[in-house]
Image (cartoon, grey):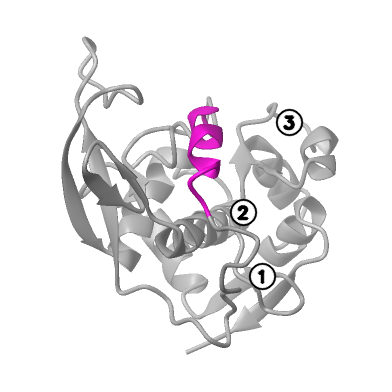
Amino acid sequence: MKRLWVGLAGAVVAFASLGPTANAQVYTIDNTAQPAVIRVAIRGLNPSGEPDPRGRIEWVQTVPFEQYCEDVLPNEWIPSWNTESLKAGAMAIKMFAWYHHLHPVTIDGFTFDVDNTVNFQTFRYMSEQPMTNRAVQAVRRFAYVRPDGEIIELNYRAGNPQDPNWQYRNAQKMAQWGSEYWAEQGRNYVQILQFYYMDRALRQYG
């Protein structure tokens, strides 16, 4: 998911085949604690100096889980957006990361949960900002899961400005611009999540 404007890259699809099998354990909010840390594969830079989704993995950085969320949100959502949009984004980022922490992959000898590019979510170490940090903390003890508590990834795409982006609702993906649209219409972050992700429930934990 690229820094808001591009969204989740198709490269994630390639990793899907490395994910859980039909007989794998079902991880729920009741039997699985929030991760303490997450392993982030750091890829090489492209000629513009940006992390390259197709770049060579140089190393794997272990990051405290909440810090990871704080260092992703300002790179996926515009920090000046409405607070409720930021909270919705914080929840999506957290659940996406939590799911992939439970389903790590190994590529070129490196085992990791996510990388730092649009293959997963754009992560820039120490890029946190006060407004986005507050959003992460606001959803700190909540998860957005299936009704039975199963932890699943919450995908999102950029979408179109000033539009509810109905097409993403039908695909069970949140539009980043759509989250801002609905927040400006007075919806809170739970209502925004409910619009885009059907058959989900907000659960408190910890």
| Front-lying residue, 158 or 186 | 158
Q: Nearer the viewer, mark 3 or mark 2?
A: 2
At label 3, counting other C-alpha atoms closer than 10 Å, the crowd grade (few under 14, some 14-19, many 20 or more) is: few
Query: Under tag 2, what secondary structure?
Result: loop
Kindly identify the residue that appears in the image at 57 percent across and 55 percent down.
Answer: 92
| Front-lying residue, 82 or 171 | 171
Query: Under tag 3, what secondary structure?
Result: loop
- Tell me the CA gap for discs 3 and 1: 28 Å
Task: Say which label, 3 or 1, has the lower sequence index.
Answer: 1
Task: Say which label, 1 or 2, has the lower sequence index.
Answer: 1
Disc assigned to residue 145 = 1
Q: Which residues are magenta?
A: 9-19
Q: Kindly identify the amino acid type of the residue bearing the numbered disc 2.
A: Leu
**Against 178, is 10 above or below?**
above
**Residue 23 picture quarter:** bottom right
In the rendered image, which residue does mark 2 sit on? 154
Extreme-front residue of the structure: 23
Kindly identify the residue that appears in the image at 52 percent across and 71 percent down.
Answer: 139
Q: Is residue 184 magenta?
A: no
Q: Is residue 6 visible?
A: yes
Q: Kindly identify the amino acid type of the residue bearing the numbered disc 1.
A: Val
Disc assigned to residue 23 = none
- Tell me the CA gap for discs 1 and 2: 9 Å
Kindly identify the residue that appears in the image at 22 percent across and 45 percent down.
Answer: 110
Q: Is residue 127 visible?
A: no
In the rendered image, which residue does mark 3 sit on? 162
At label 1, counting other C-alpha atoms closer than 10 Å, the crowd grade (few under 14, some 14-19, many 20 or more) is: many
**Residue 65 picture quarter:** bottom left
